[in-house]
């Protein structure tokens, strides 16, 4: 398997969940590069599984100096970058009645501002014809309870794929976005007691038209397509990888 042989990749939030699933898929297709995250323990565990062709860089994507350092160190180690995955995200859960300015700033900084500046700071280090992959959410399309702010940020990210592609036509750099639905990641652990996890996942699976929740590997396979020459005619596009939730769920 060598669709990404010798390609240099950078994946923010690549130490767990969807980001790590993408990193594993890239590794299996011959890529090398960098995973970025804040947690040193999960970074160490993830890079140990990825092997010698990957390194881990601890950084906070909401800090512009950290972003610049990531791309400088990547270039020093691997040269110019072929694939950039702006995956890091998260933020506050609540309604317009409960989330205040601090929650707003934190959520927008992590899910929108960091995506814009990840790409902005990467540009001098990207090869001509590079692929930029953004990560959206079907919360941008469906008004899930308590996800108003997060969904709004992800809706803006979906637009950025179009805007970035237009901005970068002269460099033949393509930007596209993967929009996951409910996916089996460690994020569940942050919001749900351990003894309720299995029940919650079964509930979500029952809501999904496809009959199961997503796996990081599902996003990884899609990211390989967007990173490879197989998608060379695709730019500014959104791929809904959500088990049919957006268009088919009742």
Image: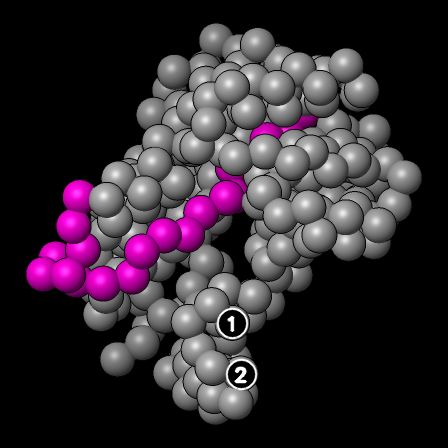
Rendered location of residue 216, percent (x, y) = 61, 61
**Residue at the location (71% across, 19% down)?**
73
Q: Do the numbered discs 2 and 1 sit on residues whose CB atoms are within 8 Å?
A: yes
Task: Rate crowding at label 1 as few (under 14), some (14 to 19) or many (20 or more) other CA atoms within 10 Å.
Answer: few
Specify whether residue 96 is painted magenta: yes
Would residue 106 be found to the left or right of residue 1 on screen? left
Would residue 192 be found to the left or right of residue 133 on screen? left
Give the CA distance from mark 2 to mark 1.
7 Å
**Residue at the location (28% across, 53% down)?**
151
The image quadrant where one finds the C terminus is: bottom left
Give the structural element (helix, strand or loop) at label 2: helix
Mark linked to residue 189: 1
Q: Which residues are magenta?
A: 82-101
**Residue at the location (16% across, 50% down)?**
100
* Residue on which disc 2 sits: 194
Would residue 98 be found to the left or right of residue 112 on screen? left
């Amino acid at each position: 398997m060598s669709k990404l042989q010798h390609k240099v990749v950078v994946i923010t939030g690549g130490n767990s969940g969807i980001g790590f699933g993408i990193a594993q898929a890239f590794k299996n297709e011959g890529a090398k590069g960098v995973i970025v995250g804040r947690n040193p323990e999960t970074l160490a565990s993830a890079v140990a599984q990825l092997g010698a062709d990957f390194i881990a860089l601890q950084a906070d994507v909401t800090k512009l100096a950290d972003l610049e350092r990531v791309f400088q160190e990547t270039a020093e180690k691997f040269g110019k970058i072929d694939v950039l995955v702006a995956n890091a995200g998260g933020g506050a859960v609540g309604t317009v009645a409960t989330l205040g300015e601090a929650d707003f700033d934190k959520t927008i900084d992590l899910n929108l501002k960091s995506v814009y500046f990840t790409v902005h700071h990467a540009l001098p280090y990207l090869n001509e014809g590079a692929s930029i992959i953004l990560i959206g959410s079907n919360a941008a399309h469906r008004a899930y309870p308590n996800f108003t702010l997060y969904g709004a940020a992800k809706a803006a990210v979906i637009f950025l794929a179009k805007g970035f592609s237009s901005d970068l036509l002269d460099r033949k750099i393509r930007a596209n976005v993967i929009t996951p639905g409910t996916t089996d990641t460690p994020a569940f652990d942050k919001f749900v007691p351990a003894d309720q996890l299995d029940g919650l996942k079964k509930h979500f699976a029952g809501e999904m038209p496809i009959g199961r929740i997503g796996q990081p590997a599902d996003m990884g396979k899609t990211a390989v397509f967007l990173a490879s020459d197989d998608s060379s005619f695709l730019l500014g596009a959104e791929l809904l990888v959500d088990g049919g939730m957006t268009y088919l769920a009742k």
